[in-house]
Amino acid sequence: MTELLRQGTEYFTGEFGVAPDGLWSAPGRVNVIGEHTDYNDGFAFPIAIDKRTTVAARAREDRMLRVASSAFPGVVETSLDGLDPDSLNGWAAYPLGVAWAMSRTAPAGALTGVDLALSSDVPAGAGLSSSAAVECAVALALNDLWQLGLSRQELARIGQLAENRVVGAPTGIMDQSASLLGEPDHGILLDCQSLKTESVALGFAAAGVGLLVIDTRTSHSHADGGYASRRRSCEDGARTMGVGSLRALGTEDLPRAATLLDGQTFRRVRHVITENQRVLDTVAALRTAGPTAIGPFLNESHVSMRDDFEISTPELDLAVSSAQELGALGARMTGGGFGGAAIALVRNGDASRVAEGIARDFSRAGFTAPHVFPVSASAGARREQ
Ligand code: ADP
Ligand code: MG
């Protein structure tokens, strides 16, 4: 048993005084390319990473739900009968939001209470989707304990519903899809319109390359408002262009968009249209030429987010330019923006030199020291025991 599983079992037993019925885990994710495309029905290409949240869980005989997390003090308790999406808050909104979203699909009174204990090595708020790791681990555990038989796609929707309706974050389906569907050394090509997914071999190990995450450890206060306002711009752009979502548009529509949209909305729309194309180009390059060929798409994606979508920050821009100057094959900010992390695709032999160089550049710029660490594409959510 790995250390994380042993800790998960011990933590549950310490909190609840009995052994759990089982252990489930789900990973965080890194988006390789395809940013702010998910809510536009577009394409994204994330990986599940080698950092996971485990949940130890045990069915109860009554209708109580109790959740504990090693990251937060105290046990939060509620009854299945009193689960109200509007009154859940704080960290417990994530696991209990999932319980609410799942319990809606079951016949009234059919479900038993559950005790849940979370432990995790996914850093929170670093753009690695610790939130989806919690949601997907809990969703998988409840799916088993409640014998609901829901598919992974349905579980992803449940995680998204919890995050949108209960936590109140208007996020798309990418994070949960990555956490549930990831595979070692594979990315997940996600079509957010059909919700079809395809596992695509990365070939990183064979090519001797890997991804570094550069967590800038910054988060800007306008992150939530910025995300919502970008969503609105995309909706406005689609409406003016006469389409249901920006997915319906391609690069051939850009000249018409330029005449119909105001300058800012046009740039937002151009980011989404070109980013969708870059996702497809990245996957095609992986298939035909291998991972060393995808760097230019990562670089172009960053420029598009910096200049057209305007969601980058000085720290993210420095992380990217510094990685590029130090010899990375490609680099871009990743995640929602306004802080968080960047990724760099590097040759394995260059990884520590690039990491050290970025730290030195941050120090010279007077920025908070970044956390730079490698991630590898890993298995999605699973029952561990
Ligand atoms: P990200 O998903 O990028 O890490 P979010 O703000 O979406 O950032 O989610 C972070 C939140 O998810 C935390 O503030 C906390 O409420 C919840 N969370 C993350 N990890 C855990 C954990 N191990 N236990 C309980 N809640 C967690
Ligand atoms: Mg999140």
Image (cartoon, grey):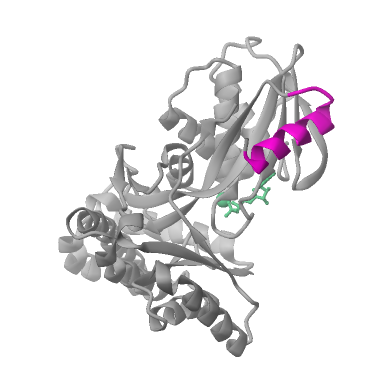
Q: Residue 252's image quarter? A: bottom left
Q: State the extent of the magenta-drawn residues as a range.
A: 2-19
Point 54% across, 58% down: residue: 127
Residue 339 in the image: above or below residue 70 = below
Q: Residue furthest bottom?
A: 364
Report if residue 164 is visible in the image.
no
Looking at the picture, how far across and down is residue 370, in whole percent? 60, 73
Give the prevailing secondary structure in the magenta stretch: helix
Report if residue 130 is visible in the image.
yes
Point 48% across, 46% down: residue: 175
Q: Residue 89's image quarter? A: top right
Point out the image quarter for the C terminus.
top right
Looking at the picture, how far across and down is residue 270, in whole percent? 29, 66
Residue 382 in the image: above or below residue 171 = above
Looking at the picture, how far across and down is residue 221, in whole percent? 64, 67
- On the picture, is 300 further left or further right than 249? right
Between 205 and 333, the one nearer to me in the picture: 205
Point 79% across, 29% down: residue: 13
Residue 96 in the image: above or below residue 272 = above
- On the picture, is 222 further left or further right than 153? right
Point 40% across, 41% down: residue: 183
- On the picture, is 261 further left or further right than 32? left
Between 356 and 365, the one nearer to me in the picture: 356
Residue 228 in the image: above or below residue 298 = above
